[in-house]
Amino acid sequence: MKPLNLKKDFPVFNEGPLVYLDTAASSLTPTRVIEAMDTYYKTMPVNVHRGVYQMSYNATRKYEDARENIANFINADFEEIVFTRGASSALNMIARIYEPFIDETDEIIVSEIEHHSHLLPWQQVARRTGAKLVYVPLTKAGRITVDNFKKVLNENTKIVALTAVSNVLGYKTPLEEIIDLTHQSGAIISIDAAQGVPHEVVDVKKLDCDFLAFSGHKMLGPTGVGVLYGKKALLDTLEPLEYGGDMVDYAYKENATWKDAPYKFETGTPPIAEVIGLSEAINYLRSIGMDRVKAHESMLQTYALEALDKLEGVTIYNPTSETGIIAFNIDDVHPHDAVTFFDEDHIALRAGHHCAQLVMAFLNVPATLRASFYIYNTKDDVDAFVKSLKEARNFFTSVGF
Amino acid sequence: MKKLEQLYRQIIMDHYKNPRNKGLKDDEDYQSEHIKNPSCGDDITIQTKVEDGIVTDIRHEGSGCSICCSSASVLSELLKGKTVEEAEHIAENYLLMLMDKDYDESIDFEDAVAYQGVKQFPARIKCATIAFKAFQNTLK
């Protein structure tokens, strides 16, 4: 298979030299996604679900077609797709709408490799309800395994909240078996797939997960839109989190009734242009093929790790990761010092705790550098990165680090 | 790479590797202020002792990048022995200098002048300012 060469599709590359290795934080936006949103604003910039005039009908149609398209992408049903501000917002909503079913006799399973947006909502639910927050023991490398999951799963487990892919270590969680075990013990599972859906085929029916969330801006879509997937039977039984226009069915002086899911979870004017943009991003990803996306990232990761393996003075924290995320540090150099060096070479890397402070505690470091690959990256990008990394290491040694 | 080299070669590495006045005091006469930069994990505590309107001691402790840690050390040397008014004036103008705003150019910033170089790295200005911001709060 020929390696992908897609930089021409991403207008930001016209702005000057850029080696972009921070997709795990946010991906770049292709021209056709920008144009799809532009078309909405130019030709039908009106609200959905409200107006009875033709233009509003057209906008509504576009918005709901996008829902159908996004549902198909993860093999969900149309009614199971709720649009939110992003994955964080979706994960918070799941915790909030499920909270009424949790009490002090229950246990909530999370892990130290969760992004803050999946850990903190459940931590707070536990604090409010008195439920016990239980952490899956990680392996030495920082992985969640089925065996370790079995150690914490019991008849009191009400919720399992785990990530599909660690945003720092890139490890994949063995979801199929974990979901199966979760259901056998009568619990339900919420999955943070923000680092999963953009990079490989995710089939919610095959997974049989209860809730799953992802963001638009990590998969070539715009910021400000995310998706909450919930099984229809579950969404139907849950109460809305926010009240207002569009989600209401009938309003009376003392009470009100709600529309059916997904609409009862979407009040106010939704991010219409962003939903349309995300749908177009999915069309673009489909045109490449998710298997090819995955293979391309894997090729770049292998190529990078081979080069990094030969470097002295660099520590890789996740050499066995099965996704295109590399967490590393230059020995004795704070990542924030290092990242400025890369920045001077127009290489965009993430430095920090990656919204996962418990992972940093697990690795026993204050912060790490992170390089992450996507479809627009090439072997040349990896070469530039490795060259800069060598120079950075030599530079910091020379000034006395 | 020249500008980065200059930045590090100057004073920063000296204070990063050999910090002055490091370590906190367990003494009620010290006012403490703890500031974190949640985006990168810089974490710094500044302690100030004021006697008769004079800053008689400044201590610091924390973890972070070289710019953050070294600036705490530089601050402790620069402002120790100054009156509270002088120290406040210098700290305020240091922050103005880094934010590229008009500042009192008659001030002798001593080693802290090195952090002018940080202006060329906007993403790092926060690193060079949090110790001074923590210090300002200890005087409030």
Image (spheres, coloured by chain):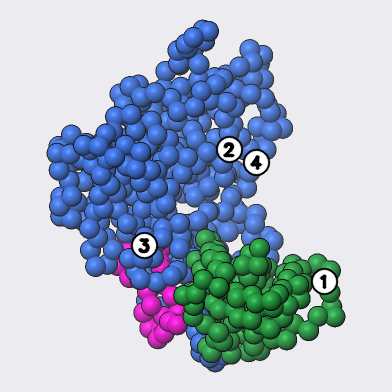
Chain colours: A blue, B green
Residue at 55 percent across and 57 percent down: it is A6
- Say if residue A336 shows up in the picture: no
Marks 4/3 same chain: yes
Residue at 50 percent across and 20 percent down: it is A247
Magenta range is A309-337
Q: Which mark is residue A359?
A: 3
The disc labelled 1 sits on which kind of residue? Tyr
A126 within the magenta span: no
Q: Which mark is residue A71?
A: none
Compared with A169, B72 (above or below) is: below
Q: Residue furthest front?
A: B52
The answer for how far apart the CA atoms under marks 1 and 3 are is 42 Å
For disc 2, the neighbor class at 10 Å (few under 14, some 14 to 19, many from 20) is many
The disc labelled 4 sits on which kind of residue? Glu
Which residue carries the number 2 mark?
A274
Pointer 4 and pointer 1: residues touching (CB < 8 Å)? no
Tell which tag, 1 or 3, sits nearer the viewer: 1
For disc 1, the neighbor class at 10 Å (few under 14, some 14 to 19, many from 20) is some
Which residue carries the number 1 mark?
B103
Which residue carries the number 4 mark?
A35
Pointer 1 and pointer 3: residues touching (CB < 8 Å)? no
Marks 1/3 same chain: no
Residue at 80 percent across and 67 percent down: it is B101
The answer for how far apart the CA atoms under marks 4 and 1 are is 45 Å
For disc 3, the neighbor class at 10 Å (few under 14, some 14 to 19, many from 20) is many
